[in-house]
Amino acid sequence: MSEIKQTRVTDAYNRLKEEILTNRMPSGFQAPEPEIAELLGMSRTPVREALIKLEAEGLVQLIPRRGARVLPVSTEDMAEIYEILTALEPEAAAALARRRPGKDELAGMEAATQEMETALEAGDLEAWADADDRFHRLLLELHGNKRMLGMVSLLFDQAHRARMVTLRLREIPKNSTRVHRDILEKIAEGDDVGVAELFREHRKDAARELLDILEKFRLPRL
Amino acid sequence: MSEIKQTRVTDAYNRLKEEILTNRMPSGFQAPEPEIAELLGMSRTPVREALIKLEAEGLVQLIPRRGARVLPVSTEDMAEIYEILTALEPEAAAALARRRPGKDELAGMEAATQEMETALEAGDLEAWADADDRFHRLLLELHGNKRMLGMVSLLFDQAHRARMVTLRLREIPKNSTRVHRDILEKIAEGDDVGVAELFREHRKDAARELLDILEKFRLPRL
DNA sequence: ATCAGGCATAATGCATACATTGGAAACTTA
DNA sequence: TAAGTTTCCAATGTATGCATTATGCCTGAT
């Protein structure tokens, strides 16, 4: 039914993206097309097309005579990314709040929040990060602006590696978790101005904390 | 020196994009790869790669057995686009204002504003729109967030056709022009809160006006 | 005339071939 | 040894070939 055609391009795309996000293919890694093609067990053609997409998403750079390079993410990159998130997400949250979504609609976000809390208690940072990610994506999905969701997803992906690295270098995200609960509540209450402000502060804090860590641990690029 | 390699992919990309933006290849236009390839006088390979990029930019849709289609822009699309712009641009303007750019730095924007004013007097709407576009891009460039610039550019391109169509359906953008001057001044003054607010209103007004026109003239998709 | 089924056509997805050319290494030369 | 040449190789950019398969058409049955 919903059997989407699994093509080699999508396969190459998915696998490469996965490799990059999990840092198995680390920042700065570079390889010519033929090598990647062999790695994936297919010809250059589909690999090439997948790489073009990854380049458009800002994960990879195609350098004419020396292959594809996994783009490092610098401190400035992170600053750029967070600046955009800081502008977009509060807006989405406010709009969502204005729409007064029902409890059922918010169930997903509620679950994500819950999971953040339990993961935090269990000390499972991976799970916490996962739930955090889900929370933010769900918010955008509920809001319904597809372009915004797409853009934010792109930014999340670009920032993914850096966030994973800093996850263990920062203090326990206890406050951040609480803020998520507050955000969710304000959305449920329809307090659009409130969420926007809260969310904005949340993002600003997150940005500052992350940048501080990158500086403190001398990690100018990941 | 700056002889960038002109490849067929970039050529195809540029030409197709041009065709689309100028509406010579209108919304909804659809053609299979071989046809486009012949149109451009090259083989399918580079055309394919160019189309993938255009798809990533949201200008085109690749439909498996029936070729590439120039994506129509619906009213909802425009609403999405303007919502994002409303969130991003005021932020950029505020940040720029905070940085207190010198007169020399603002020269480009000043020129663009000037041109908007003279174009308006001359009744040259095309020139006005051009200058308007330049104003907004320059602002983002000055701000320096490359990702934001890229994203906004993408949105501009997506909205381009609709804006061109409505250009003659709306009243003379006299007020809009004045607002640009005000924005520029506030940036020069370093009034970050002021620009943000002003810009935000500007964008909201623009969005409302545009959506009203689309509705009034029954143009649900362009 | 409508509908099911089978067939032909053509577009795609992918592999492969190949000419071009950037860049590194080897080789001079000073 | 440093700088300038030359050579060689391999990666890219592009064209082409080909198997697969979706789509529309044609046929025939109801």
Image: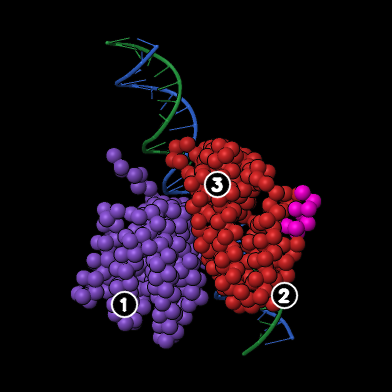
Chain colours: A purple, B red, C blue, D green
Q: Amino acid at mark 2?
A: Lys
Residue C1: image quadrant is top left
Residue B213 image point, x, y percent = 59, 43
Q: Amino acid at mark 1?
A: Asn
- Marks 1 and 3, how far apart at CA: 41 Å
Specify whether disc 1 shares its chain with disc 3.
no
Magenta-highlighted stretch: main secondary structure? Answer: helix
- Marks 3 and 2, how far apart at CA: 36 Å
Q: Which residue is mark 2?
A: B103
What is the number of the mark on residue B78?
A: none
Kindly tell me whether residue A59 is visible in this rendering.
no
Residue B112, above or below B80: below
Q: Which residue is mark 3?
A: B211
Q: Point out the stretch of residues depicted in magenta.
A: B115-123
Of tags 3 and 2, which is closer to the observer? 3
- The answer to whether marks 1 and 3 mark residues whose Cβ atoms lie closer than 8 Å is no
